[in-house]
Image: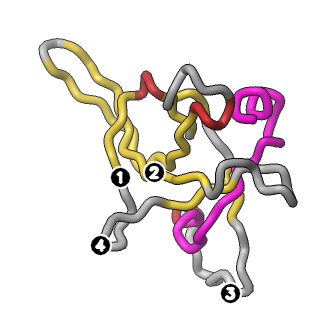
Amino acid sequence: MFLKKDPNLTGFHGLYVVQVCLFFSFMHNQIRYPCALVQWFTPVGDEPCRDIGMWMVEPNFNHCEQCVKAIVHLDTAVRGAHLLPVYSPTIIPPNLQFSKTLRPFHAYCVNKYVDHHMHQIAF
């Protein structure tokens, strides 16, 4: 998913890329707060890949080599993002579950060809 980063920056520069792990909400003082637990991704480089024309991202890890996660308010969500894995010569395990398909890869391409709106918003 894309989150708002900086409204003064245009396109991909003004967005964060995250993977949603969980949607939830909570009540505080009679106000409902819709949230998501997300895993952060960092752009690889300052511009799209010259070969394919798409931005590349990689998961953020902390000093213990664990994925960096956070809780965000859904007001910051812009739209869904489509990540394509950057494949390596390593064979993909045949028992890989669909819910864990973003885990075994080290980098991803942000697919700007999903639809017209993706192309306009993020690139």
Please state, as top left, top right, bottom left or bottom right, where the N terminus lies in the image: top right
Question: Crowding at label 2, few (<14), some or many (≥20) Cα neighbours within 10 Å?
Answer: some
Q: CA distance from mark 3 to mark 2?
A: 24 Å
Q: Are marks 1 and 2 in contact (CB under 8 Å)?
A: yes
Secondary structure found at label 1:
strand
**Marks 4 and 3: in contact by CB < 8 Å?**
no
What's the residue type where badge 1 is placed?
Lys
Q: Based on the displayed image, in which of its 4 quarters is residue 30 positioned?
A: top left
Residue 36 percent coordinates (x, y): 38, 38
Residue 122 magenta-highlighted: yes
Residue matched to label 4: 64
**Amino acid type assigned to the residue bearing label 2 in the image:** Trp
Residue shown at 53%/40% (left/top)? 16
Kind of residue sitting beneath label 3: Thr
* Residue 24 percent location from the top left of the image: 33, 36
Q: Is residue 91 left or right of residue 57?
A: right
From this view, report whether residue 69 is shown above or below residue 119. below
In which quadrant of the rendered view does residue 2 lie? top right
Residue range of the region highlighted in magenta in the rendering: 101-123
**Above or below: residue 94 compared with residue 51:** below
* Precedes in sequence: disc 4 or disc 1: 4
Q: Earlier in the sequence, mark 3 or mark 4?
A: 4
The residue wearing badge 1 is 69
Name the residue carrying label 3: 90
Asked if labels 1 and 3 touch by Cβ distance under 8 angstroms, the answer is no
Between disc 3 and disc 4, the foreground one is 4
**Residue at the disc numbered 2:** 40
The span from disc 3 to disc 4 (Cα, nearest Å) is 24 Å
Taking the spot 87% from the left edge, 60% from the top edge, the residue there is: 51
